[in-house]
Amino acid sequence: MKNNLHVKLLLKITQEYVNAHFTFVFSFLFSLLFLAYSYNFSSQSWRPIVCAFFIIYAITTAYVGFLTVRIKHNLAKLGNIPKSTRLLGYPLFLTVATGNIFSASFAFMLVSKKKTVEYTFAAYAFITQLFIIGISALNLFKSYVTDTFLLAMWLFLCLALFYIVMLILCTKFVTPKSAPKWMLLPGILLLFATFTGNLFATLLGYCLIQKARKTNPSSIEKWQNIWEKILRNTMAVFGLFFIVLMFSLSVTSSWTFDYDLATENNYGALLQTPSLEYPLGTDNYGRDLFSRIIFGAQISLIVGFFSTIIPALIGGVLGAFSGFYGKATDNIIMRSLDILYAIPGILLAIAIIAAFGANTVNLIIALSVGAIPTYARTMRANVMQLANFEFVESARALGASDAAIIFKHIVPNSLAPMIVKATLTIGGAVISTSSLSFLGLGIEPHIPEWGNILKVGSTYLETHSYVAIFPGLCIMLLVLSFNFLGDGLRDALDPKTN
């Protein structure tokens, strides 16, 4: 009985087994989706490319299932995963060519026994870069894209090689607590990768600089513990991956995509079905849906981030003053915000846009105003809880001003719930952006934005459903990704689990 409990616990805490089980389930689901879409019922014919993907994913699912059983057997008999089993993960690296992020990430987790936070960041930075290269490479089938396309592709390939080198170096030289001093230079170089939007590289660079400098061991340990908890949450990791991928594509799209293909009408290519030249087809104006969705990610992320950051800052300041001073100050601030809170956010946004016009700036303002009270309430509750703690009394006894106590001592200790709330609600901002654009009250109709694309596609659901399906999937995946990441941050930053 004890032995069975020990095995169950071992299976639960072993990351390789958890990832194997997760990968098997999702690969199986994608296999079923490809199987369902492989037959065209309207023309009574099979889709060869989709059938090929179904076969590849089905083989991958069977192979991952075999590895799952083998890992479970190893853990039950040996208590660990031997090298012979880890070597079986290398063939799964090939599945990244089919876009199977689940099996590719599982391969990186399986082949290495020593997995530091830096190793995981390097692996996902490399996978993200491969996806950027693969998505951008689909433009090769167009007659013209942009003058910087070839140069950008060479840059992307060089970055992918750089991430592979960093992956190897992290495996050999980086430990959970330290890194050699010479890793400071690669860490600084990785920070420059921020300009390509690959935030995994940025996180890797920051971690390496921290460990190479060895300035504050307690800070390094706290940072490592937080990310170890997040990275153990598989759904949170894949949510973060999709967010980083969308952000990176938004940053690099101007180098590899032609904006005119997303905005200029092409009456010779109206409502084209998906093909190599038009991977996601075209809309009723002949505009490339693939390019429109890529450029649309910029708008969705910009509006989502700014309509979350602005109310978080304003609401955070108001909530901090309200919670710290209390009484009259609390009544004035919170009762004023209660009036604002009583107005439905989407109705307030519609009223502001109707009064000042539909554009990106007005949309951000409209979504920000209605969200201020919720952030103020969150910060107020945190500040009221911390205001009577001993470290606050000590700061006051040492003569610190109220502003210093609030912004140097209380607010930094109240940021964790605010960060979690912002991550969980940013998905709602993306939905609101798309919803208002769908209603014609958001982004200007000619600008490629997921809500605008979905509005056009909604009129062709019966004849050309792909025009609505693809932007709808992007909205759904981005919102789910933020929610999964928010759940992971909430678990990692919860003081009860630390």
Image (cartoon, rainbow, N blue to C red):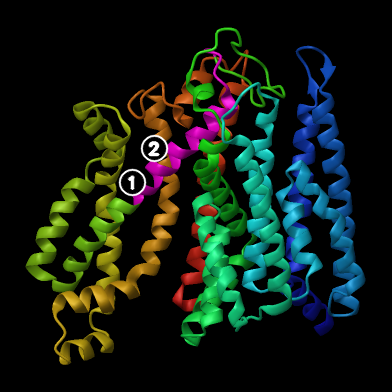
How far across and down, in percent of the image, does residue 302 sit?
40, 43
- Where residue 217 appears, as percent x and y from the top left, is 50, 86
Q: Nearer the viewer, mark 2 or mark 1?
A: 1
Query: Where are the magenta residues, as a range?
Result: 284-308
Q: Nearer the viewer, residue 496 or 49?
A: 49
Name the disc covering residue 24, or none: none
Residue 141 picture quarter: top right
- Circles 2 and 1 in contact, beta carbons < 8 Å: yes
Q: Does the stretch in magenta take in 294?
A: yes
Q: Earlier in the sequence, mark 2 or mark 1?
A: 1
User: Percent position (x, y) of residue 108?
Assistant: 75, 62
Task: Give the side of residue 389 with respect to residue 242, left or right.
Answer: left
Going by the numbered disc 2, the residue's amino acid type is Ser
Instruction: State the CA–CA distance, disc 2 to disc 1.
Output: 10 Å
Q: Which residue is mark 2?
A: 432
Residue ID at (42%, 26%): 447
At a point 73% along the width and 68% down the height, the residue shown is: 168
Q: 71 above or below 354?
A: below
